[in-house]
Image (tube, rainbow, N blue to C red):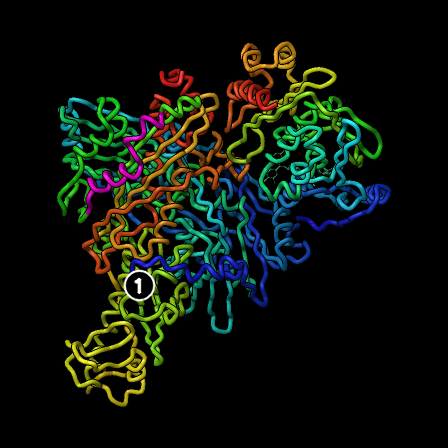
Amino acid sequence: MYAVNYHKPASIEDAVAAIGGAEEAKILAGGQTLLPTMKQHLAAPSDVVDVRGISGMTDIAVRGDTVTIGAAATHAAVAASSEVDTVCPALATLAAGIGDPAVRHMGTIGGSIANNDPAADYPAGLLGLGATIVTNQREIAADDFFTGMFTTALEDGEIITAVSVGKPDRAGYAKFRNPASRYAMVGVFVAQTGSGVRVAVTGAGEDGVFRHAGLEAALSSNWSSEAVDGVDVGSDGLMSDIHASADYRAHLIKVMAKRAAAAS
Amino acid sequence: MSEGIGAAVKRKEDKRFITGRGKYTDDIRMENQAYGAFVRSPHAHAEIKGIDTSAAEAMDGVIAVLNGKQLKDDAIGDIITGWAITSKDGNPMNVGAWNPMATARVRHVGEPVVIVIAESQAQARLAAEAVEVDYEELPAVAAATRALEDGAPLLHDNVPGNLIFDWEIGDEAAADAGLAGATHVTELDIVNNRLAPNAIEPRSAIAVYNDIDDHYTLYTTSQNPHVARLVLSAFYNIAPEHKLRVIAPDVGGGFGSKIYIYPEEITCLWASMKTGRSVKWTSDRSEAFMTDAHARDHVTKARMGFDADGKIVGLKVNTVANIGAYASLFATATPTYLYGTLLSGQYNIANVYCDVKAVHTNTVPVDAYRGAGRPEATYVMERLMETAAREMGMDPAELRRRNFITEFPHQTPVIMTYDAGDFHALLEKGQAAADIAGFAARKSEAASRGKLRGIGYSCYIEACGIAPSKAVGSLGAGVGLWESAEVRVNPVGTIEILTGSHAHGQGHETTFAQVVSDRFGLPMDNITIVHGDTDKVQMGMGTYGSRSGAVGMNAIVKAMDKVEAKVKKIAAHTLEASDDDIVIEDGEVKVAGTDKKMAWHEVGLAAYTAHNLPDGMEPGLKEGAFYDPTNFTFPSGTYICEVEVDPETGVVEVVQFTAADDFGTVINPMIVEGQVHGGVTQGIGQALLENVVYDEDGQLITGSYMDYCMPRADDVPSYVLEHSTTVAPSNPLGVKGCGEAGAIGSPPAVINAITDAIGNNNLTMPATPHKVWAAIQEVGLPQAAE
Ligand SMILES: Cc1cc2nc3c(=O)[nH]c(=O)nc-3n(C[C@H](O)[C@H](O)[C@H](O)COP(=O)(O)OP(=O)(O)OC[C@H]3O[C@@H](n4cnc5c(N)ncnc54)[C@H](O)[C@@H]3O)c2cc1C
């Protein structure tokens, strides 16, 4: 790793100032993605600004039917949160299935979605739930936030402060783990929400997480395995690599969609 | 005695390992230590047109930037292959020259080209990035079968067609005739997947040059520090042996990958002399994937013929073995004398023939790794047996029974003389422990949950305790494969055992002490094991090929014989009895049938005070021995695997794994169990998860744990272990060895179980969910699960 200046501000204002004052700043949360890339010299920021000390950043609170999760809440905290459990147990289950215990105790929800790894779990959960991503500048709907593989709607230096999720009527997540990395080779999040059925797929798409219209239509008319069976999930636009062909991923999307629906 | 042979004594060494107080090479810091970082080839095959080090040299903290030409100019030797194989046409093998750092051409991704020495590791790595190497890329080839094709890119000018040797064993005409007369022939195309060893501690070296004495010390992650010193002196011209000390302190796993003396260690020694600084280099995991010797990588065509009774009448095996860009130390022995010689398995076969073509490719060198050749042989044999049984409609256990060797010694047609074993007993024990009778019920219960349950056998035999020096010498080995030991009894009666074996996870500090404790009736606490330092132990051949028990411990026994004889003489003299009447029991030296005795430590003291020794006896109590085995040892076993396959996803769960092994005498059953657990887990890793993938251009695709899949605890079941013992007749302890068996025996059991479950035999390792799912698609779901 190259030498780097480390900041740990206590407020958003101080964080913004630290970012603004640096030659090239990177926001640091759990470091589970950023630090390995820095060690390999794939990223070389002059400064890192650790957002975990900002007040309120790790809070998880329920207001009405909505749970708001601080951006620096770890996966382990989300998995164990009774607040998350009352609003959407499927999201807690998703968090409990990320990586291994060490990763879950360091990695954060904000870091995960800011990174938007095409095989990460949270993007499927938040897109599937129609969540709102709150930053220091604005609120962004999940539908607008995930814009492609490793890319998001965030501006340079924009800090995610929280994520809020409304209570779905039902929701479920099923993940097929990549045997090596244990990220999602295919992960499907299904939810019945006030605004209809949403199905989000991660791990499979060449452009990262995406919603599947065919599966949404099928589950809207009939929330069942049989309905999923009738959907034609093609392999167009799906990834192919040493672990899985696009065809196999297409097949797994259906299997995981059924399992997610059954788990809801 | 509770700490003697056969006792499940807790491991002495674990206290320091599990409290983080082990001392590994990277934990050692020298006073004037500098750090080395290597500039490595990003290309699989390229000509080096020029190297510009000026920017790197100008950077902060940089002490020196050195290249392969400078190293060659200083007469540092090329890296050797330790075993000369003769082709079937009588010609010697052709191996390409291997410079420790590339001089003109690079032949695999990760090959070192330049070393940067700097004050800190970070500075060294930064400067390494600033070295500019001008490459002209050449076409590359990664697959061994492709490298043999006409027009394939050629790696070395002196290796036509990339063919290192075309070797054979057995009688081809006899095997052909046997097959021609067979009533049934089973034919298989077999791929033995390429593995990366992945010891938990990466390789590391600290080279310390002392210009006053012109003396070198190398701390390194080695399984055999004496062999390291030998080749560094004799072939790499670092220094004569008396001016080179090699220390292998605590080493965190080797599995074969730390047998070899790699370019990095040689370069650090030379760089230490060039710079006058201690030079430390520690591999990171990415470097390990690109430089630690890989394993396996065979492509095989095998045919086995049977008569109407299911007796094997002929076996013919043709194998292409990928050796990588350069032929590493045991690379040529592994796919020949450690492979072809085991192709008789546990079976009485008159006609066996095997041909092996060894090939250079633009990949990391391939060498011995836990099992080395024997897993590949076992996979061929046991996939053939299971497949044949299915094709002939026979019970796979019954087919094996009909062919088992039952009389010993048994001379196979492929060199080996099996000296002991009871294969029927192992199969019976395994079947009973695996509850074969209950399998049908378990299968239908699994079907009710939508799962396909399958069962598979593997009856392995392997040769370890490598090996009689004379025998291996006649087959082309460059060294003898004995072991040495010294037993030092101190004046207070405590004992130090010096051994040429090296422990890197095996627990020698415990088991070796148990052997001594057993012999003299002394508490283990009074016995210390010394190893891993060429200044303390004079010479040794190290640890690999499951040889520490079968060879290393028996050297200790031989030295103890001499100590015992002297102890008896001293006691007989003091107690006024005859030598023959003296017995050593529970730490006492007694005159049998009387109450006359001396405590063990009193004899020790008497030997050193020397006030009253028999006439002509030298003072002191210290004896050494070299033990050269008279035969290999032959561990054997029956492994039975049960899997459940999820037909929707292709996911395989190993739900039960039974291992019934014959390891001869067991010194410490707990440690032996641990060895089986580790070995079987590595075998399940090979069968289900692990695979090194290169693309067509020789780029390494599986360069990290994101893509290279190691087995984790939740990938394996709780194992069911059984033993059935025949002692090894060739050594005094009767031990056979247990370090590799698990990795040797398990892969075919797993694949046999999966192919049984899914009803499709067309499946290669690793059986990933994707491949298993595709194999199910190919044939449709078996009846029971529909
Ligand atoms: C071994 C391993 C296994 C893993 N397995 C999985 C898995 O199964 N599923 C899965 O989904 N993930 C997995 N991960 C990734 C893990 O979830 C990480 O936590 C996540 O990718 C990044 O979160 P982080 O808090 O560590 O972020 P960091 O690494 O600190 O940062 C990641 C990126 O996000 C930016 N960032 C961080 N916080 C903010 C913020 N508040 N506002 C704006 N930008 C921000 C950073 O600048 C950086 O670009 C795994 C990681 C490892 C190391």
Q: In terms of image quadrants, where is residue B282?
A: bottom right
Which quarter of the figure is the C terminus of chain B placed in?
A: top left
Residue A246 can be seen, yes or no: no
Judge left or right: residue A36 versus residue A244. Answer: right
Judge left or right: residue B510 versus residue B186. Answer: right
Residue B556 can be seen, yes or no: yes
Q: Taking A250 as reference, is A47 above or below it?
A: below
Q: List the single residue furthest toward the bottom.
A: B611
**Does the magenta stretch mainly form a helix, a strand or a loop?**
helix
Q: How many marks?
A: 1
Label 1 marks which chain's residue? B
| Residue ID at (43%, 45%) | B293
Residue B618: image location, x then y, percent: 25, 83
Pointer 1 residue: B4
| Residue ID at (37%, 39%) | B296
Question: Of B451 and B712, which appears nearest the observer?
Answer: B451
Element assignment for label 1: loop
Residue B595 is covered by the magenta coloring: no
Question: Of A65 and A75, which appears nearest the observer?
Answer: A65
Which quarter of the figure is the N terminus of chain B placed in?
A: bottom left
Question: Of B716 and A246, which appears nearest the observer?
Answer: B716
* Magenta-highlighted residues: B421-443
Ligand 1 quadrant?
top right
Residue B292: image location, x then y, percent: 46, 46
